Amino acid sequence: MESFALLFDGFSLATQPANLVYAAIGVIIGTAVGVLPGIGPALTVALLLPVTFKLDPGGSIIMFAGIYYGGMYGGSTTAILLNTPGESASVVTALEGNRMARSGRGGPALATAAIGSFVAALIATIALAFLAPLLVKIAVKFAPWDYFGLMLIAFVTVSATFGSSPLRGLTSLAFGLWLGLMGIDQLTGQARLTFGVPELLDGIEVTTLAVGLFAIGEALVVASRHLYKPEKPIPIKGSIWMSMEDWARSWKPWLRGTAIGFPIGALPAGGAEIPTFLSYNIERKLSRKSEEFGSGAIEGVAGPEAANNASAAGTLVPLLTLGLPTSATAAVMLAGFQQYNIQPGPLLFAQHADLVWGLVASLFIANVMLLVLNLPLIGLWVRLLAIPLPWLYAGILVFASMGTIAANPSVVELLLLTGFGVVGFLMRRYDYPIAPAVVGLILGPLADNALRRSLQMSLGDPMVFLQHPSSAIMTGIASIALVAPFIFKGLSRFQQDED
Amino acid sequence: MSGKTLHTPNRPAAVVAVILFAIAFITYWDASAMTVRASYGMGANATSYFVAVLFVALGVGHLVSAFKPFDLEAEASDWKAIGWIGLALASLIGSIWLGGGFIVGSTLLFAFTARAFGRRALLADICIGAVLAILIFLLFNKLLTLALPQGPLERLF
């Protein structure tokens, strides 16, 4: 019941008028950017991070929550109206949603996505509020070796299990780990891989890497392949409201999607792709009108959208309690927290309880605002989709580079951004996943720390990771997850193809 | 997009392998030059060595896959468009390097990127870019007090 009191405090922080304004601004700009084709939630959060730099930590985190949920919602709008999902988690939404839009039922498709996301996020955020304190109680007992085992699991699941090939995923991860080495080592003060460039002493900014790989890389790919032929968003005809039948067919998929999405998102194995695919398949089997699947079944939008949002709230569990990002979006969010000098992890709940619960409360508020603002504003979002691509990408590049120099006004930072853009382009061209690199950069230094602190405590004995049952089990899981895809080639069916 | 036969060596994988070996070597060389030693346990260079070994392993993996059948066709690319984006980013970097400021740099970035995506109206795009850059500058420098690089134009505001 302690959670309730703390959550209540959180609400009193989040409902201060200024913070409500921040939440509303966050939701609106998050949706506006998330709606743009080719921009997923990870990039939305990375691009909009500089907007929140100068607010107080409470206000910026609250705006951040709005941006996060807004970006998620914007992505599904694009998937339904344009059939170009901005992120892998919306791929499934596009399957049925776009068909619905083509047959003139775009309104109900958007409505069931919005309301389903609302229901899912609401339930998942409640689950987060209850689960997080329990997990914190366990996490405070974690020793460095346990953390290291946990990070091994995160590394392997993010890179090896779901890429087009484990080799490519691990290479992407290694690139991130390598970038994570750069800069001054926290434990000894030794500079690594700085090549005498003073700007590199602070290490590589996660946002620079994410924006370079995602935004600049994407722009290069789109330009090089002439993918900019005008694709018209499908106009919404008829009522945007759902009929009674739509409601009747939607509410169960919402709940099932939530039940699938949250636990999978909360595991360190994370990701929203698996729950959305699972939910889609389950709804197709359970639907009384399964013949409609493939030509616009509302269950095929309701379930996966709920699963997507529930798993997004689920990834906040390891992120907040363990400081462990399990998706590119979570990695960028962690970078955002670090900008405000907040280090997620078990201590966060002790030291900044007000901020944590303020964030959870503002997730609720952002969620409500999304529902209230987005259905009426749908016409505006559709018009954003119609921006000609040359201007759109030109604007994205201006904004991306602006964010980079605003965070760190130096030419070196821009050169890094450009370099990461080229790498991102090549990675896309040769089918290397991008998310593992971002996760590697942010988790690499943490894993380095955990590894070396464990070995300090064990006086250099590497068996320390196997002597403690907890870390031995986690190391075992990580090894199995690493080897399994090579044995069961069928597992690579789930191709992770992130924003 | 020529059809690849089964026994064509996978050239990209071989190139990646070479790059991975190079990175491994750089990392090893950097680690071997480290002077700060940890008093006990592992030093900062231990992780570097570990990452170097990881790169060697991945490089070997790529070498092996280079001799396997090639399942991925690289798509034809419009290098001219990529060149325009390169020029766009170079203009921004040059403008900030030489003290031209954010607005000039971003205007050129906008106009050249739009050109890369097939726009032909360079002058119109320069105007749009300038308006956008000035708006962003005013919003972020004045309202949010972020320090964007200043040049002669920015000092007028």
Image: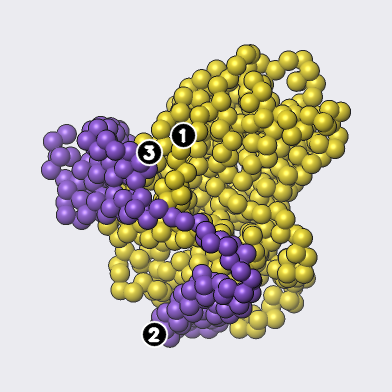
Chain colours: A yellow, B purple
Mark 3 falls on what kind of element? helix
Q: Measured from the top left, where is residue B29 in percent x and y?
A: 42, 84
Instruction: Please indicate whether residue A178 sits to the left or right of residue A80 in the image.
Output: left
Relative horizontal placement of residue A309, taking residue A16 as reference (left or right): right
> Please, what is the three-letter code of the amino acid marked with disc 3?
Pro
* Residue position for label 2: B33
* Mark in front: 2 vs 3: 3
- Please, which chain is the residue tagged with disc 2 on? B
User: Regarding mark 1 in the picture, which secondary structure is present there?
Assistant: loop
Question: Can you say which quadrant of the picture contains the N terminus of chain A?
Answer: top right
User: Circle 3 sits on which residue?
Assistant: A390
Can residue A123 be seen here? The reply is no
C-alpha gap between disc 1 and disc 3: 10 Å
Query: How would you rate the neighbour count of disc 1 (Cα within 10 Å): few for under 14, some for 14-19, many for 20 or more?
Result: few
Q: Which mark is residue A230?
A: 1
Task: Output the chain of dot 3.
Answer: A
Q: Tell me if residue A28 comes above or below residue B74 in the rendering.
A: above
Is there any visible trace of residue A428 in the rendered image? yes
Question: Mark 1 is on which residue type?
Answer: Pro
* Residue in the picture at 20% in, 43% down: B104
Q: Is residue A108 placed above or below A127 in the rendered structure?
A: above
Toward the viewer: A225 or A197? A225
Q: At label 2, which amino acid type do we have? A: Ala
The one of A187 and A328 positioned closer to us in this rendering: A328
